Amino acid sequence: MKVPIIPKDSGFRRRLRSELLKNCPYASHWVDSVIRTAYSIVESWRKRYLKGRAKKAKPKIKRRFARCKITLMKIDYNTKTIRITLKPWEYLTISWKGAWSERRVRGWTVGEVVIKDDRVIIPFKNSKVVKVKRIIGWDSNELSLDGYEPSIGFIHIDLRPLQSIKIVYERKKAIAQSKGKRKLYEKYEAREKNRVRDFINKLSAGLVRLLPNSIHVFEALDKENLTSKERVYRGRRKRNARTPWRKIHKRVSEVALTGSVSSKYTSRECPKCGFRVKTQGGARIRMPKMQPEDE
């Protein structure tokens, strides 16, 4: 496998910037933002390609977007408006006053705005200090999320309803596809996404209510390996594909503090002393570094 080389020297960046600025009517900061975003996308593709998770074809942008640098924005928190410089003496003004999230983001700061063809996304950052009460480790399984916290004990979250949603709409989409009804297929696909999103949102909100001021630690699962034809048999592969672990972890990270650990050996290694057993068999394991009462 040939290793893709991404030029990062300052001379190349200056030449690239000068070339993009030719006949560009917009503020020069937009060109800087484009270069930075492009480097981020290509670097991400390069890492995945070297790990065998991405194809050789270079990444392409399917939907246009522009990330606005802070230097291009003038934010007025009193009127809740943002003025973005597009060209010299030409501005775009947007406001979050009256939006459903206005009360929720009160006292927060605005991040880098993202401009798309059909909408503008305003990210907010909250810098308040959170006093952490507990750390909870979660085991991500096909049909459940299982956690443990000493003061509460074991916590089991059933993910079977999520699997049921996927199975039901897989059948409906297959029937619509066999009949060549594209609009009906897209309708079922949109409904499936909405129901999955609703389930994950409720799950995340429930975790925050049950376990406030907590850090949730998840396994950094490699879904490509879990759905690989060479490594996993067909039935297990389909079940793994139906469980959106990454979406769950991402949504929880939006409403609570989270962390991640490698999933390697998590079922065989003691988090206290680091001892690793040869197999996963048995509910209780006596380790040489532990006292009988710690078994």
Image (cartoon, helix red, strand yellow):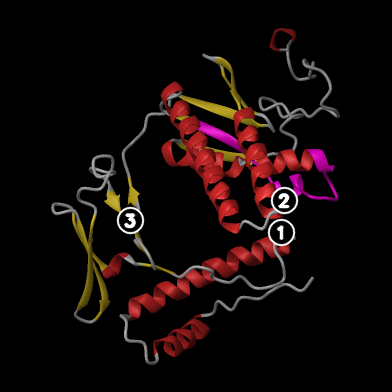
Q: Quadrant of the C terminus?
A: top right
Compared across the picture, whether 80 is left or right of 42 comes to: left
Q: Amino acid at mark 2?
A: Glu
Magenta span contains residue 229: yes
Q: Are marks 1 and 3 in contact (CB under 8 Å)?
A: no
Left or right of residue 68: residue 172: right
Label 1 vs 3, first from the N-terminus: 1
Among the two numbered marks 2 and 1 on one chain, the one whose residue lies closer to the N terminus:
1
Report the amino acid beneath label 1. Answer: Arg
The answer to whether residue 243 is visible is: no
For the point 29% across and 44% down, the residue is: 101
- Could you tell me residue 155's position as x and y percent? 58, 20
Looking at the rendering, the stretch of residues picked out in magenta corresponds to 215-235
Q: Quadrant of the N terminus?
A: bottom right
For the residues bearing labels 3 and 2, Cβ distance under 8 angstroms: no
Q: Are marks 2 and 1 in contact (CB under 8 Å)?
A: yes
Percent x, y for residue 238?
75, 42
Q: Which residue is mark 1?
A: 53
Which residue sits at x=42%, y=89%? 18
Q: Earlier in the sequence, mark 3 or mark 2?
A: 3
Q: Secondary structure at mark 3?
A: loop
Q: Provide the residue designation for mark 3.
A: 122
Q: Which residue is mark 2?
A: 224
Whole-angstrom CA distance, mark 3 to mark 2, is: 32 Å
Residue 147 falls in which quadrant of the image?
top right
Q: Given the current orientation, which residue lies at the most extreme left position?
A: 78
Q: Amino acid at mark 3?
A: Ile
